[in-house]
Amino acid sequence: MSEHVNEDAVHLRAEIARLQAELDDLRLLNDALMEHGEAVEDQLAQQNLQLEQTQQRLDAELADAARYLFSILPEKRDTLPKTDWLLVPSTELGGDSFGYRRIDDDHFACYLIDVCGHGVGAALLSVAVINVLRSSALVNADFREPSEVLAALNDMFPMERQSNMFFTIWYGVYNATSGKLRYASGGHPPAIHLRQKADGPTEPTLLITMGGMAIGAFPDIAFESASLTMEPGDRLLLLSDGTFEVDRRDGEMLTVDELAAFAAGTSDRPQAIHDWVCSFGDGGPLPDDFTLLRIEF
């Protein structure tokens, strides 16, 4: 009997020793995992901090870039031709821009461009084009002749040298002596001409030249110019497609004709038009850049 008890005690002590050894191993493994886990958490915390710092730096740089884009836009004019404008990018950086300037004492140029896409690339191309137009840095182009300006821009900015990006443009030149406005468009929405009739309501007319392709899409494209004689009190609205390409509640997209009718019948002020266009949305940002330049003659 005592022999069996001794044998059982030996087996029990052996089993306890084995379990104790396993427990010690598990404790060592747990300690190692805890130590490793703390190291991983420290590493993840450091990486998250670096990501936050990088994001903050990128946000600051985007804000600086956005401020620069707005800094190159012209001051609003309170003498004829008077100007008012509104530019609301759909993202931090958009591809819309515009400008106006006196070419000489008799000629006043106005233009609006829309680069395809958004982001840094579109903004850089937009700035480059605007700076070329502001500084008259086009070879073999008379800036008083819109068709020549568009052809020269097409030669200067082929899309294969611009990361496959292109842009559209509406460009006009007003002759103060004759009252004539010459204009040309390259793949761009029409400008809206508004004239108050002596015995009736304001009448809108869409100004666009047919056949003009987007700038940079194809080489050696010929552009056409058209003209219209402006009368005192006439207004001209230059706009990007983001001003009207908004889905209405019935699922149909707003049209430039509807925008022209609103401008003629309700208000042609950029802020009023923006508020009206936003009323068709869900209260969030518009899907594309909203850019509208109003010129009063």
Image: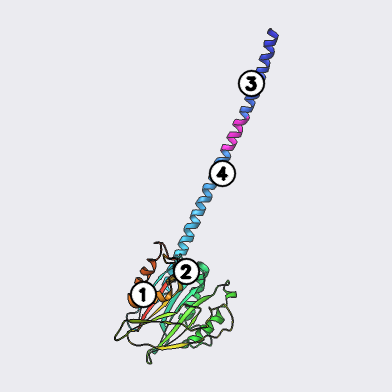
Element type at mark 4: helix
What label does residue 40 carry, if any?
4
| Mark 2 neighbour class, 10 Å CA radius: few under 14, some 14 to 19, many 20 or more | many
Magenta residues (range):
25-34
Q: Which is more toward the observer, 215 or 155? A: 215
Tell me which label, 2 or 4, sits earlier in the chain.
4
Is most of the magenta stretch helix, strand or loop? helix
Q: Residue furthest front?
A: 250
Q: Which is more toward the observer, 162 or 254? A: 254
Question: Looking at the picture, how far across and down is residue 105, in whole percent?
Answer: 39, 89
Q: Which residue is mark 2?
A: 94
Q: Which residue is mark 3?
A: 16
Tell me which label, 3 or 4, sits earlier in the chain.
3
Q: Which residue is mark 1?
A: 262
Q: Is residue 89 above or below residue 226?
A: above
Q: Amino acid at mark 1?
A: Phe
Q: Does residue 143 show up magenta in the picture?
A: no
Tell me which label, 1 or 2, sits earlier in the chain.
2
Tell me which label, 3 or 1, sits earlier in the chain.
3
> In the image, which is nearer the foreground, mark 1 or mark 4?
1
Mark 2 and mark 4: span between their CA atoms?
A: 40 Å
Mark 3 and mark 4: span between their CA atoms?
A: 35 Å
Mark 3 and mark 1: span between their CA atoms?
A: 90 Å
Q: Residue furthest left?
A: 199
Mark 1 and mark 4: span between their CA atoms?
A: 61 Å
Question: Looking at the picture, how far across and down is residue 97, in whole percent?
Answer: 45, 74
Left or right placement of residue 91 versus residue 274 in this view? right
Q: Amino acid at mark 4?
A: Val
Q: Amino acid at mark 3?
A: Ile
